[in-house]
Image (tube, helix red, strand yellow):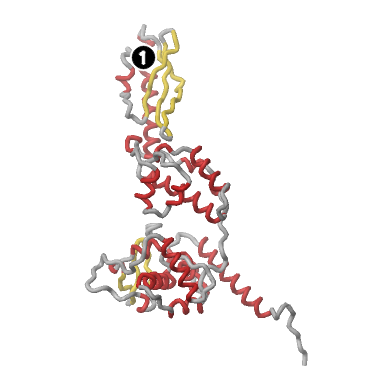
Amino acid sequence: MVVSLQSQISNTMKEIASIKKRSIGGGRYALDLHYYKDGKRVRESLKLYLYPPSNDENRRLNENTLAIANKIKSDKIIELTNKAGSVRTIKSMGMHDFIKREFHGSMLNILHWVDDIDVSNVTKDFCLQYINSILESELADSTKHHYIHDLNAVLRRAVMLDNLYENPMQNIDIHRVTPQPIVAEKDFLEEWELMSLISYRCKTEAMEQIRKAYVFACYTGLRISDLTALKWGNIVIYQGHKAVKLKQTKTTREVIVPIVEEWLLPTPPSPYDNDTRVFNIPEKRCIGNAALKRIAKQCCIDKVLSWHTARKTFACRLLSHNVNPIVVAELLGHRGLETVMVYAKAIDSSKLDAIDSLTQNNGTKPKIVIK
């Protein structure tokens, strides 16, 4: 007998998914599946029907129909839970507060473009409006690229922390619509540039800490996220030599990188313990990058230095000394060789330019003298 369908199917407003009946006349009811998607309630017709319980056959039919409906509801709950956790865990937080809390101000550029709406209310249309506003701006293509991908990173983080049910950016082909940044082929330091950087001394201790950390990255390939997290407890003895042993912040892969020169490490403070940071540098990479530009100018280096330039310098120096690309990938913490091959192409380009410079003589071809 059909008595209170709601009591049989455990339907509450806080449930992720629920079954509700809808009268279609003649004492019959259609069953609908209700669930939340993108913060909005969705109704989906199951094409299942309940009949008046006037005889045993209808009652048995209704029981089977309810069992099928419950199975569909259970499968939907599992699907939604695996996808984004329970919607009951979604927390209400404004976009401004969320970015400031989770990204420490590194993506505050987004705040100049969006209103302080609730994170859980961000939709695909909202993302498309943001992307269009960026694309129509007068920003450089590389800046547009980073601003759009910054919003994607914010939303991925919100999903992971259950502040957002689903990332609406995953339904947008941002790689197709976003301008690709121009990648400089020679954005790594040559030997004389690295030596100039090593011999230079900054006037302030804060700048000197950044310079030392950058040189250390040129010899170890560490990312800025790993440099800021590097502690003296990560300095170990590996096969008789000092080495960096840590789990990378970005990939969570553990790497061991030998330290080839003792002078690369700063003098430990006194007293210190394993939790003391090796380099006292700002976590915001924009501050470090601005300092590196000033240091490069003082060292007569006509290149835009960034923390990634140091990592690329490390890889290119190894490849130029014929180190196996597999070993280079392992030291960098890469799972494949794709990125390492990009570095190898940069070296090939540099070699070609060096050969071309030998054949240039104020725009004229060299004379060939036969004796």
Q: Residue furthest left?
A: 271
Compared to 59, does 256 lie above or below? below
Compared to 345, does 85 lie above or below? above
Q: Where is residue 258? Give x, y as percent.
A: 38, 73
In front: 73, or 304?
304
Decide if residue 202 is in sight here.
yes
Q: Residue at x 42, y 11 (%)?
A: 28
Task: State left or right for residue 268 relative to residue 40.
Answer: left
Q: Residues within 10 Å of mark 1 (few under 14, many from 20)?
A: few
Q: Please tell me in which quadrant of the rendered image residue 332 appears.
A: bottom left
Compared to 358, does 291 lie above or below? above
Q: As shown in the figure, which amino acid type bears the numbered disc 1? A: Arg
Q: Report the residue marked by disc 1.
A: 60
Q: Residue at x 33, y 73 (%)?
A: 238
Q: Residue at x 37, y 76 (%)?
A: 264
Which image quadrant: the N terminus? top left
Decide if residue 329 is in sight here.
no
Compared to 349, does 131 lie above or below? above
Q: Where is residue 151? Give x, y as percent.
A: 46, 47
Q: Residue furthest bottom?
A: 371
Q: Secondary structure at mark 1?
A: helix
